[in-house]
Amino acid sequence: MTSWLPEDISTYGHGIDHTIRVIYYIVGAWFVLTEAVLFYFIIRYRKRKTTTATYQPGTTFKALAWILLPAALILVFDLGIDLVQGPVWNEIKIYLPTADQTVRIKGRQFVWEITHPGADGKLETPDDIQILNQLVVPVHKKIQFELQSEDVLHSLWIPNLRLKQDAVPGRTIKGWFEATKEGIYPLACAELCGSGHGTMKGQLQVLNETDYQNWLKENRSLEVGRVE
Amino acid sequence: MAIIGGYLAYLFRYQLAFPNEPVPGYGLVGPDQYNSFVTMHGTIMVFWVAMPILLSGFGNFLLPLMIGAGDMAFPRLNMTSYWVFFLSTVVLLLSFFVPGGSFSGGWTIYPPLSASPGYTGVIWGGHLWILAVALEFTSMLMGGINFLTTTVAMRAKGMGLFRLPIFVWMINIASILFMFSVGPLIAGAFMLLADRLFDVGFYLPASGGDPLLFQHLFWFFGHPEVYVLLLPALGIIAEIFPVFSRKPLFGYRTIIYSTLVAGLLSFIVWAHHQFISGIDPRLAAPFSVTTILISVPFAITLFAFIATLWRGSIRLTTSMLFALGMLAEFLVGGVTGIFNGSTAADIYIHDTLFVVAHFHYTLFPVTFIATFAGIYYWYPKMFGRFMNETWGKVHFWITIIGFNAVFLPMFAFGLAGHQRRIFDPTLFDYLQPYQYLHVIATVGLIVMLAGQIPFIINFFASLSRGKVVDRNPWLANTLEWLAPSPPGHGNFDQEPVVQRGPYEYSHPLLKERDWISQGEL
């Protein structure tokens, strides 16, 4: 089942994939077992001339054990799932690591306006590079993002990074990721934002350090402080 | 309304499989129409099909019969509730024909998209949507009050609370859940209307509001609402299982207690819809724990149903097939919910077609499969005739096969990263390799919709051609089978006096037959 997942190129993606896999095996086993029992009972206890049904109201504790014990096991597995997923969630959403670099991503009907820090590595300086629908980051760097929206709800969705976060107007939501592989990956909007929602797409470009520096130089025309 | 909802599904499903080709029977579907169809499909199916059929339809007919009452406690309130519902339907359907078209902001109507007509271009469609839903909820609220009063005040002599059929319990618990959850939503909807009409700004950050406030209000209602639909459906199959396996319902009291626990839990799980919505991430952990925990009481209930089959004598009538089908398919919805309830997995799964698959595996068995089970089972009581069993089985198999063909592929789609509510998946390169799954799903949907034709014909043809039955054709114990088929005014010839619980099948003291009515001395 997990073979459907796209290639994971982030440092924390395996945590999410692992959680999905753990849940899959646990609920998969339950599901198969329960359906098997259900179908077995249907076939085994079909009405026959010779058989009569047994009176079994399930009122005694001993009889109820047949359903309460499996349910207790489910409780144990539920808590197990909580234990597996908790640290993954903490790593991704709660504790922000020290950032090597910060980018600002702003959603607007129906584009992503992305501000990269320029050569100085800082936002809010004249050499920031502003560009639509293109998120360009160096590989193996902790990138912090500040997510905003200008109008309605959007949701930043980069499947290969296992990254999804809603953009809410009036708020700046911080998050992070670290890409581990160079390449070009899809970026989309996952929250209905109007008629163009299905066309609101972009690209994540992961470059090595040299290519990234070259990219900065080549795109100096996009610097916000630049006056031609 | 179910036909309209199904037709809308066909329109946007076809568009997904063959983007930008005219849909046979309609024409081209643009992005605006696509959003509007998706919105109205969700609205209609949840609020105008599932709720009225399961709660009002079955509830109004069965609840008085099952507790041995002549009628509902407040017949006039019942009538008012019906006409308010009728009015709400008119208002909703009207929204298709006003300038700008029907609402297109998603059935969850998240602001700011829904709060300012400027974002969608839909003005009247949005106002009418909110008005229609508010009217519909008012009608349901009146119905709920009536159910509770009737159950409390009008039970036949001897009908103690623990002799009530599970269906009656479920309808009442569902009504209570609805009552406690709907208030915040109605308030939230009127605040939204104020934003739309007068630019008040409850949800608009520019005016000091917050879009997330609406999400909290919506899901505080929205999650219990799932159980408002689920419980009557479980109630229906709880009535059918014992009759066709000739056994008492296993763990009758345990089912009631675990349902009450699940009902309570349903009020503290709402934020699992908001893990990545921008709420403080620290909030996610407790909500994830409560969400996953809710699997325990429902597991108990489902296991109890399965245990009811053990060492029974099972007859696979059409209604029993549908009841078993409901259980088998609902299990898929149940276990896949764990993925959404888990914070870490939800980061990836949220807002993908995986979620769409999950909730259709929960709500389709609830809304349709259980309803069909109920219709085939109580049809003789309603009309005094049987429905044709052979056509019923044809209907069952086409529905089940079609349904799985539509929604199984969506799990794979979701994992591949297919986000929801995009009208043309071919615009995204990474979804191209899976486009064939959309074709499979669309074919499945057409098969499933066509499969309802035998049902509709069977339903109407059996009104005059079905085999005539007496009062108790299935040899069942509950009180409704004591009344004439169909029940006349006042339901019973004489007021029944209840002697025992509703599921005393195959009791060792019974000789010659394996059943004994609740009202028999």
Image (cartoon, coloured by chain):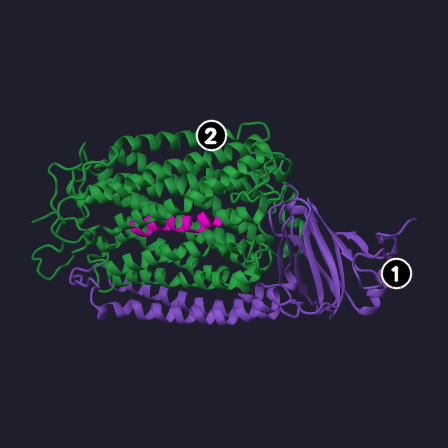
Chain colours: A purple, B green
Nearer to me, A207 or A226: A226
At x 43% / y 32%, what residue is drawn? Answer: B89
| Chain of residue at mark 1 | A
Q: Is residue B5 magenta?
A: no
Which residue is the site of mark 2? B91
At x 39% / y 43%, what residue is drawn? Answer: B50
Is residue B388 visible in the rendered image? The answer is: no
Residue B511 screen position, x and y as percent: 7, 57
Which residue is the site of mark 1? A217
Viewed as shown, does residue B366 lie left or right of B155? right
At x 88% / y 58%, what residue is drawn? Answer: A218
Task: Report crowding for label 1: few under 14, some 14 to 19, many 20 or more residues within 10 A (C-alpha).
Answer: few
Residues at marks 1 and 2, common chain?
no
Residue A204 screen position, x and y as percent: 72, 59
The residue sitting at the right extreme is: A228
Viewed as shown, does residue A20 lie left or right of A212? left
State if disc 2 and disc 1 touch (CB < 8 Å): no
Nearer to me, A29 or A98: A98
Residue A112 screen position, x and y as percent: 72, 50
The residue sitting at the front extreme is: B208
Q: How many marks?
A: 2
Span colored in magenta? B219-236
What is the three-letter code of the residue carrying label 1?
Lys
Query: Which SS class for mark 1?
Result: helix
What is the three-letter code of the residue carrying label 2?
Val
Using the rendered view, name the quadrant where residue B509 is placed: bottom left
Nearer to me, B191 or B443: B191
Using the rendered view, name the quadrant where residue A172 is placed: bottom right
| Chain of residue at mark 2 | B
Alpha carbon distance from label 1 to label 2: 59 Å
Task: Report crowding for label 2: few under 14, some 14 to 19, many 20 or more residues within 10 A (C-alpha).
Answer: many
For the N terminus of chain B, give its image quadrant.
Answer: top left
